[in-house]
Image: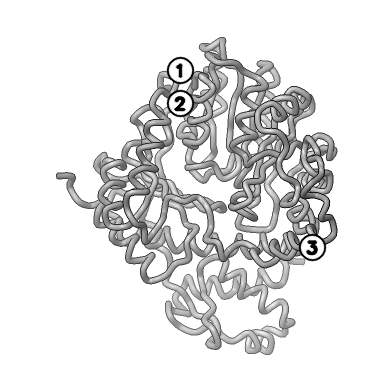
Amino acid sequence: MDPQPLYLRLANHYRRAIQAGVLAPAQRMPSVRTLVRTHHVSLSTALQACRQLEDDGLIEARPRSGYFVLKPRRNSIPPVGEPDIRQTLGAAQYVGIHDRVSDFVAKCDAHPVSANFALAAAMPEAYPMEALKQAMTRALRQSPEVLVSTVPPQGHPALRTVLARRALANGINAAPDDVIVTHGCIEALNLALRAVARPGDTIAVESPAYFGLLQVLESLGMRALEIPTSPQHGLSIEALDLAFQTHGDIRAVVVVPNFHNPLGCVMPEAEKARLVALCERQQVPLIEDDTYGALTDDDTPLPAAKSWDATGNVIYCSSMHKTLAPGMRLGWLIGGRWKARIAMLKFAQSRPNEPLAQMAVAEFMGSRAYDRHLSRLRRYLKAQRDQTAETIAAHFPAGTRLSVPQGGLLLWVEMPGGRSGLDVFETALRQGIRVAPGSMFSNGTRYDHFLRISCGQRTTPDITMALQTLARIVGERPR
């Protein structure tokens, strides 16, 4: 018996027809009711098959017209190259990262923007604004005293309970009392680093690394050791192992194993297990940022590195900034063996988060409505990511390299000929197009010819034209 679900068998049947050219681009697919009659399947099965083909980027739904075959994506654009894990590793203090980011922000503020490919979030309409507003109203109506009452020190109990329950899907077994609510994931990372290291200590980070983490390290006066990171498989365990042997002062490792920012890669499960075991053997804390993990293309949760932690050596950090509500700035962490110290630092640094938003989010995240929202958001981001990648492949100059992840909302683009990302950023900005230059993601110069492009905006003719303009800028010779 074929173990595949019936809808997948039906989808694969039409996938082969599309790939063979039997159904050509722009041609209309058989209607859902025709599929039901022809293949003797239920309406639900036919719809699932069509949605699968749509998720795979093979067909698109047009209002009141049915499904139509899409032009196949060009496969000629190669992926971003693998790093050299033998490269010399050197610690740096990230002096100047604040200056780079401040210069980026100041230049962005000075130019009106029509297409923002630098913002790592979806458009506001992709989030459940109305449902959150209603949940906030109910919370205030049912508990008006929350505005004048003492705030629970580690976060509202209802939210901590929901977060602990949701973490089970990622393989994390934590009690509500283990959860500490923070002001976004960036505060969670800040607290985790302060709990395990001091100014002057060396912290191993991925290379490239999220510039917000680099700012935190500079603010704390900590040194960073960039570890080669694969655009396909994440941080190199071999390179990290070598770093432990050659740098005896590493005090922590910080990783984004699921849909890394900016690479978009996912570390394989076997590598996550190896990473946790290596850090445990070295008695070095592992700090995990799982901000993007819920944005996988399918509805199968990705396991966190924390799920392999049996000793409390992993500090797990996350937020709902990308998945639910960018405007709420709510994050959380599970502190492992440093829980008590982190709770003390949280109280000293910023005091507890205000509770009203936590109550509203707890209600929404505790319902099936949250699962439905995530499913819609994943489909939306996949469609935007695929379309953006297709436009880049079709219009960027020959020699461009691009890795397309299976989730998240970021694309890491390597430009040909050593083209300066900073030059492209400044030229594009004058035309109302905002991108993140690769130089923001390292203290060195190895990523100066890269761009990080966000796929959060809905594809419109104006957005497509902006990408084509960006492609022209990339292809220009600098003056």
SS at mark 2 in the image: loop
Mark 1: amino acid:
Ala
The answer to whether 242 appears left or right of 41 in the picture is left
Work out how far the residue at label 1 is from the one at label 3, CA to CA, in angstroms: 51 Å
Rendered residue at 66%/41% (across/down): 318
SS at mark 3 in the image: helix
In what quadrant of the picture does the N terminus appear? bottom right
The answer to whether 179 appears left or right of 247 in the picture is right
Q: Nearer the viewer, mark 1 or mark 2?
A: 1
Rendered residue at 43%/35% (across/down): 441
Work out how far the residue at label 3 is from the one at label 2, CA to CA, in angstroms: 54 Å
Work out how far the residue at label 1 is from the one at label 2, CA to CA, in angstroms: 16 Å
Query: Which is more N-terminal, label 2 or label 1?
Result: 2
Q: Residue 91 carries which label?
A: 1
Q: Residues within 10 Å of mark 1 (few under 14, many from 20)?
A: some
Q: Mark 3 points at which residue?
A: 138
Q: Nearer the viewer, residue 24 or 288?
A: 288
Q: Nearer the viewer, mark 3 or mark 2?
A: 3
Q: Residues within 10 Å of mark 3 (few under 14, many from 20)?
A: some
